[in-house]
Image (cartoon, helix red, strand yellow):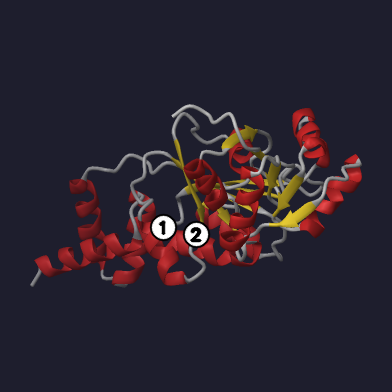
Amino acid sequence: MSEPSTGGTLYVVATPIGNLGDITLRALEILKQVDLVAAEDTRHSRKLFNHYGITTRMTACHEHNEAHKGEYLLQLLQSGSDIALISDAGTPAISDPGEMLVRRCREAGIRVVAVPGASACISALSVAGLPTRRFSFDGFLPPKQGARRRQLQEYAACPVTTVLYEAPHRLVHTLADIVEVLGGQRQLAVARELTKVHEELFRGSAAMALEHFGATTVRGEIVLLLAPAPAAQPQVDMTEALRELCATGEMSTKDIARKVAADYAISVSAAYQACLRVRGEKQ
């Protein structure tokens, strides 16, 4: 379907993820020219506006009011107003408010234009040193442990880099779950406070990351990148290893499962079940 020639335009404008200097010249031009800016948090965006002398009127559009505010914004667009959509940081509608509004505009025939710029996902990928030819972006992990572990299980054999967002107060809990579900040797990177003064990029195993971040109070925005799962070892090799460990009688089933999960890059639960099968061979 061709772009409509009547009505206003919704500009999806990316804003800095930390350093205010990362905004584009085009974004500044659009933010100054539109009739209204729909911001995730007007108080937060006011800092950016004050820094660049932007006086355009703002209205709040966030996850809690997007359904009802979207109708108001759509009416303005249909009447000919141009509106810029921004989130607190990065690109709107990407694990941020805006997806619903963009969809409604598309369905109503309103022109939607991307004004690209900063993205925490892409920024972290570019500096993490993990494979980037193919990757998966899964946004935020579930906050509850059970659901989080079930989702992590999906990455046990994932052949591409997985990019996730995480809240700072949950990072250590998530790393502990990664060790438990994917094994302590799973390689990963943690990008914290990208483009800001206290920017940090950790690269290493899940066990090392848990030790590192568990020793301090984690603050700031977090991007968590899981390396692709290493190629699986031949099943016969793992089975033989399990038999040898079980034969010694020196380790519990749970401890054997943890070791095999780390050595063969499988989940602890899968290793545990394999251990039970090997132990059952003797019966």
Read off the residue under disc 2: 141
Q: Amino acid at mark 1?
A: Leu
**How far apart, in angstroms, are the residues tagged by discs 1 and 2?**
8 Å
Q: Is residue 22 visible?
A: no
Q: Amino acid at mark 2?
A: Leu
Read off the residue under disc 1: 152
Residue at horizontal 33 percent and vertical 49 percent from the top? 264
What quarter of the picture does the C terminus occupy?
Answer: bottom left
Numbered disc 2: secondary structure: loop
Above or below for 177 versus 25: below
Numbered disc 1: secondary structure: helix
Q: Nearer the viewer, mark 1 or mark 2?
A: 2
Between 113 and 139, the one lying in front of the other is 113
Residue at horizontal 86 percent and vertical 51 percent from the top? 47
97 horizontally vs 264: left or right = right
Crowdedness of circle 2 by 10 Å Cα count: few (<14), some, many (20+)? some
12 horizontally vs 184: left or right = right
Point out residue 218 in the picture as x, y percentages from the top left corner: 69, 62
Task: Determine contact: label 1, label 2, CB under 8 Å.
Answer: yes
- Which quadrant holds residue 146? bottom left
Say which mark, if any, is on residue 97: none
Pick whichever of labels 1 and 2 is earlier in the sequence: 2
Point out residue 42 in the picture as x, y percentages from the top left corner: 78, 57
